Image (spheres, rainbow, N blue to C red):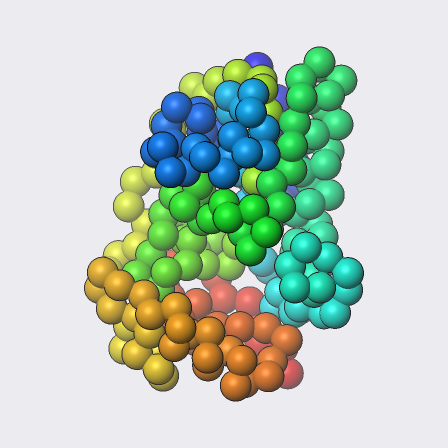
């Protein structure tokens, strides 16, 4: 099956890319195989955040700490459309639960695709949308082919703006202090992340802030 068939199922605000399971390291394969032992292809779906309200997390029964957002609901709907299509074609699929449940880091997988790369702000940067992207992952035993380049060219321009802007010095050229970032988010008592490192990033178009 060609990746073009998959992308034909996605709305304009989304894009899909694929990875062969054999392109993953041994420690990356383990949690994926635990979810689907027969996995051959990994489909990563990226949704473009065009409105900041899409990324506001609200309390609702879900796999991510009993909270969800519009972007995640929409991306999961897109994943389900792909899942239903592959089922009709005779293939098995599994939707990967959120990282806190599955142990699978979505952005690490996306980093292996033509969609973009992880930037110095430790966010996944889409080649056109920058950090304004939400990710979801689907596993399948179908062999997905792609005629386009598998890996993306460099997206992050190493401008250093995110490193300078972080109020808790959680970012550096080759490191990310997740504890500092997490503590700031918890203290802010906000329904969404602080977004400073995303909003200062020159890649992509910044959506209007939620007031």
Instruction: State which quarter of the image contains the C terminus.
Output: bottom right
- Left or right of 109: which side holds 63? right
Task: Specify whether residue 165 is in view.
Answer: no
User: As displayed, is residue 127 above or below residue 192?
Assistant: above
Task: Specify whether residue 155 is in view.
Answer: yes
- Horizontal and vertical percent for residue 88? 76, 17
Instruction: State which quarter of the image contains the N terminus.
Output: top right
Q: Which residue is painted at 30% across and 55% down in the image?
A: 156
- Horizontal and vertical percent for residue 146? 46, 21
Q: Which residue is painted at 51% across and 21% down in the image?
A: 40
- Left or right of 186: which side holds 87? right
- Horizontal and vertical percent for residue 131? 45, 59
User: As displayed, is residue 53 above or below residue 183?
Assistant: above
- Left or right of 28: which side holds 37? right
- Horizontal and vertical percent for residue 102? 56, 46
Q: Which residue is painted at 54% across and 51% down in the image?
A: 99
User: As displayed, is residue 33 above or below residue 55?
Assistant: above
User: As displayed, is residue 115 above or below residue 59?
Assistant: above
- Left or right of 70: which side holds 137? left
Image quadrant where residue 83 sits = top right
């Amino acid at each position: 099956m060609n990746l073009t068939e998959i992308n034909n199922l996605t709305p304009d605000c989304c894009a899909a890319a694929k990875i062969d399971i054999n392109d993953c390291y041994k420690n990356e394969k383990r949690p994926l195989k635990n979810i689907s032992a027969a996995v051959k292809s990994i489909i990563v779906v990226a949704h473009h955040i065009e409105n900041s309200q899409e990324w506001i997390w609200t309390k609702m029964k879900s796999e991510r700490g009993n909270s969800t957002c519009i972007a995640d609901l929409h991306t999961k709907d897109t994943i389900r459309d792909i899942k239903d299509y592959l089922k009709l074609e005779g293939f098995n699929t599994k939707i990967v639960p959120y990282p806190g449940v599955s142990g699978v880091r979505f952005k690490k997988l996306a980093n292996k695709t033509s969609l973009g790369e992880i930037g110095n702000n430790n966010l996944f940067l889409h080649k056109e949308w920058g950090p304004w992207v939400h990710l979801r992952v689907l596993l399948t035993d179908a062999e997905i082919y792609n005629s386009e380049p598998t890996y993306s060219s460099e997206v992050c321009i190493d401008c250093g703006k995110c490193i300078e802007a972080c109020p808790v010095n959680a970012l550096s050229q080759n490191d990310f202090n997740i504890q500092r970032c997490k503590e700031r988010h918890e203290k802010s008592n906000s329904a969404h992340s602080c977004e400073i490192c995303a909003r200062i990033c020159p890649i992509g178009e910044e959506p209007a802030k939620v007031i």
